[in-house]
Image (cartoon, helix red, strand yellow):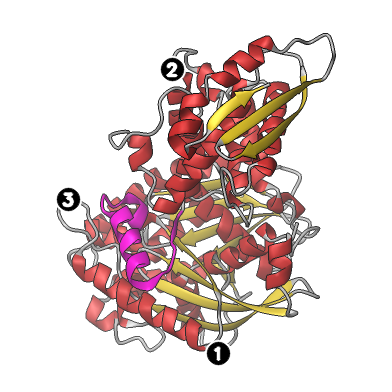
Amino acid sequence: MIDNQDLRYFQEKQILLASIDIGTNSTHLLIAEINLDLKSFSIKFTDKSTTRLGERDDEGNLTEESIQRALVTLKRFKEYCKSNGVKQIVSAATSAVREAPNGQDFIRRVFDETDIKIELISGSEEARLIYLGVLSGMAFEDKSYVIIDIGGGSTELILADKKDAIALTSSRVGAVRLKNDFLNKDPINSERSKFLKTFIQGSLEPSVQKIKRRSKEDKPLNMIATSGTATSLGNLIIDDLGESKQKIHGYKFKKENLQNVLGKLLKMPVLEIKKIPSLSERRAEIIIPGALILNTAMEMLNFNELTISERALREGLVVDWMLRKGIIKNEFFIQSNIRKTTIVHQASKFGVDKKRAEKVIDIAFQIYDQTKNIFHNDNDSKAKELLWAASNLYNCGKFVNISSYHKHSWYLIKNCELLGYSEAETNIIAAIARYHRKTLPKKRHESWQNLISKENKKIVLEMSLILRLAASLDQRPEKVISQVQIKLQENLLTFEIMPSNRNHDLLLEKWNLGLCRNAIKELKNLDLKVI
């Protein structure tokens, strides 16, 4: 839903939103104009720069040269947005940054120098956003589709239909990664070509098997390819067939068309490939490994034809933003509830008692509502949403061991797949669960070190305190508390607990709540009185 703050922001019928996709090979900018009446968006401007973050040093870190290229590009993008009245920017980094040991340092550096906040997303989240982007620009019929996105460092394979993403997969094989690891000489001989095909097959096998397991035999299956590799190959095929230039979005080609072009490319040295007019110099260096991945995927999934989509991750970021703001509701109903769905799924997987979690959430939200400007100043409800997620999952560590379960909860939440949440948000949710009991955060704690900004640490301190208080009141299976009333007089914070039945004395709950005195005193310098 659109809250009051959003309503103030959405005074105009059209909004300019920028999305930035920081990939292994290129960094892309898209500026979308969102029409609130039509609940849709149109693309006003796109730009990209070949930043090659996939170039690593011997320790796997992003090189200073690649970081500088990215910073120059992002500063230029930011200046363009500023000069054109773009007030909102959403940005995501993919495999190159998430795999690099200095990836978080890069994110902090970007924020310090450009004020752009980058969300570091997982492979599965990247696949989900790609699906949203493709769905926004292509009419899905009553069929299932396999979407393939060949990036510089990873390849995403997605099984989806017009209602939902059925399988989201990501493999650590990409055009830049293959070039850097295996293609030091050219042209490529048949022996090397066979080796690469075998390597690609092994890398894609888990994703392909997942797609096949979840496919429905009674539903037609089509393939959609997106990314620079797909569009570049589409243009090469158009040239090879002698067809007139045409719009690449929606263009279809057959596997034999791809294989004919690939066969010719394999016989050419890179210097000759770079002379092809439809290929940029940088794309020419990675077009063969990209084509090998696409051809191998088509063979493994038994596709003889595919359709190209020009929409992908950057458009998906726009759709995801619209979903989060409640601008899109019905058309993408399942996707708009992806956060709720994934939290409920993980809670069920780890055996969390749903009814008790709902009790804690009810109390936590009562405390949250009554402690604005006392415990927190969460004006946009962002922290409240993360509190909700943590309140559903804070007990999941008992699945491992009831002793120190809050530490186990942190580990499980941090390492499970929370679709719809960035890595930073996942770390916040995990830390809220970690600090809902026992000791407060310490600098040496890994769970504290993983929080990348002061703002994130502030959210954890405030929301974990609220969860600590709410969880302390959950002492019995049945619901015994109807509501809590909180009052602040000078430095004294009074909690009055109302029983749901007069026969409930609530002595146990009051005693447990009293154990939170030290945390309230240390974090907020307030004294606690329980009545």
Say which amino acid is labelled 2.
Ser
Question: In what element is the residue under mark 1?
Answer: loop
As drawn, the residue found furthest toward the left would be 58
* Magenta residues, dominant SS class: helix
Say which amino acid is labelled 1.
Lys
3D distance between C-alphas at marks 2 and 3: 35 Å
Above or below residue 446? Residue 270 is below
* First to last magenta residue range: 96-120
- Mark 1 crowdedness (10 Å alpha carbons): few <14, some 14-19, many ≥20: few
- Of badges 3 and 1, nearer the viewer stands 3
Residue located 36% across and 43% down the image: 450
Q: Are marks 1 and 2 in contact (CB under 8 Å)?
A: no
Residue that label 1 marks? 245
Above or below residue 168? Residue 242 is below
Task: Note whether residue 414 is visible.
Answer: no
- Compare residues 190 and 151 and report the one nearer the observer: 151
Question: In what element is the residue under mark 2?
Answer: loop
Residue 103 spot, x, y in % from top left: 31, 55
Residue that label 3 marks? 59
Q: Are marks 2 and 3 in contact (CB under 8 Å)?
A: no
